[in-house]
Image: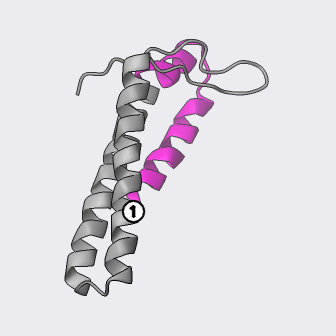
Amino acid sequence: MSTEHEQDHCQDNEHRTSHHSDKVKKNLITRLNRIEGQIRGIKSLIEKDTYCDDVITQISATQSALNSVGKLLLEGHLRTCVVERIQEGDEEIIDELLITVQRLMKK
C-alpha cells in the first residue's frame, strides 16, 4: 500500500493530533460517508423485514469497509507518528501500537 499521509507534529506536550493531506482526508471522509449510507441501508432492511441472511451479508460488507478505513489510518500512523516518535527515542509508542493492533484484530 502506498500512502499520501502528510503529518506534522503528531504529538506535542499536551495533546496528540494528526494532520492528513487534503487528498487523504477526502478519501477517508468519502469512505466513511459510504459506510454511513450502508448503515442506513441495513436499518432499512431490518425495518422491511428483509431475509436475515441478506442483512448479514450487508453487515459483513460494512464491517469490511470500516476495517479498510482502520487499515489506512494505521498505515499512516505507522509511517509518520510511530516513526517520528521512535526517532525521538520514545519507545512507549511500541506499547501503544501493540494495543492499537490488538484492537483492530479483534474485529
Please give the residue where the numbered disc 1 appears in the rendered image. Answer: 39
* Residue shown at 57% from the left, 31% from the top: 93
Apparent side of residue 33 relative to residue 10 in the rendered image (left or right): left
**Closest to the observer: 83 or 69?**
69
* Magenta part of the chain: 79-107
Q: Is residue 100 magenta?
A: yes
**Closest to the observer: 83 or 26?**
26
**Closest to the observer: 67 or 80?**
67
Image coordinates of residue 46 in percent, x first then y, are: 36, 81
- Quarter placement of the C terminus: bottom left
Image coordinates of residue 70 in percent, x first then y, are: 40, 43
* Residue shown at 50% from the left, 25% from the top: 82
**Closest to the observer: 62 or 88?**
62
* Residue shown at 53% from the left, 48% from the top: 99
- What is the three-letter code of the residue carrying label 1? Ile
Image coordinates of residue 78 in percent, x first then y, are: 42, 27
